[in-house]
Image (cartoon, coloured by chain):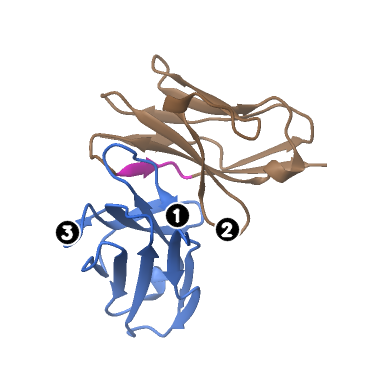
Amino acid sequence: NAGVTQTPKFRVLKTGQSMTLLCAQDMNHEYMYWYRQDPGMGLRLIHYSVGEGTTAKGEVPDGYNVSRLKKQNFLLGLESAAPSQTSVYFCASSYGTTLTWQFFGPGTRLTVL
Amino acid sequence: AQRVTQPEKLLSVFKGAPVELKCNYSYSGSPELFWYVQYSRQRLQLLLRHISRESIKGFTADLNKGETSFHLKKPFAQEEDSAMYYCALQGSTLGRLYFGRGTQLTVWP
């Protein structure tokens, strides 16, 4: 099993450009999450999904959109990138209510110039 | 409200010394707590769950509901323990974890 994978690993954007980060998991997990990791701030939840076709806002959702059209995929979109969105983005997944610990992807390092 | 506090951003010890990484939480219900570890430029990995009461890589953590703490301990630190450690709380929203800001542990030779 590949576990949780993320595409791309690195990306540099100019302010105002858009992009989509892809997260995929092959563990049949119900729940999926997007976090951003910034120095001194730890992990902050952007959006999450408790099942196919559902999404919910986390702690820092502004400037991001998500979609969960298939159970195994969770997409994070930046419509108009800003330098404040320079960060490392981690996707995670979990079984959900009974087994709640999360499995993380390798991260995407995004720089917005 | 749910909150996790890790009071130390940085912690340094020498190899062979005991280490304790502090974690305090704020939650009115029955918490489920975790420790995650992130080695340099790698993904986060689950280290411990309080409900399993296990010891992983020599680390243990005990939930103290009276002090609302879940400190991570190891009696003899090793250089390979150098990493970022995150404490996380499963609170009232099922499936959602609340993370502390992390403690960067450095073990000197």
Task: Check disc 2 and give the amino acid type.
Answer: Gln
Q: Where's the C terminus of chain A, which quadrant?
A: bottom left
For numbered disc 2, what is the local secondary structure? loop
Q: Say above or below: A40 vs A52.
A: above
Identify residue type, mark 1: Phe
**Does residue B3 appear left or right of residue B69 in this picture?**
left
Q: Which residue is mark 3?
A: A54
- Provide the residue span drawn in magenta: B96-101
Q: Are marks 3 and 1 on the same chain?
A: yes
Residue position marked by numbered label 2 in the rendering? B42
The CA span between labels 3 and 1 is 20 Å
Instruction: Give the chain of mark 3.
Output: A
Q: Quadrant of residue B37?
A: top right
- Place of residue B90 in the rendered image (x, y in percent of width and height, measured from the top left): 33, 36
Q: Compared with residue A87, is residue A51 higher up or lower down, i.e. above or below?
A: above
Chain in brown in the render: B
Chain identifier, blue in the render: A
Q: Residue placed at 53% from the left, 56% from the top?
A: B43
Number of numbered discs visible in the structure rendering: 3
Q: Residues within 10 Å of mark 2 (few under 14, many from 20)?
A: few
**Seen from this angle, which residue lies furthest front?**
A1
In the image, residue B63 sits, relative to residue A17, either above or below, namely above
Residue denoted by label 1: A104
Residue at left 32%, top 84%? A16
Disc 1 element: strand
Residue A113 seen anywhere in this rendered image of the structure:
no
Q: Residues within 10 Å of mark 1 (few under 14, many from 20)?
A: many
Residue located farthest toward the left when viewing the structure as drawn: A53
Instruction: Check disc 3: other Cα within 10 Å, few if <14, some if 14-19, many if 20+.
Output: some
User: Of helix, strand and loop, which one carries label 3?
Assistant: loop
Q: Nearer the viewer, residue B106 or B80?
A: B80
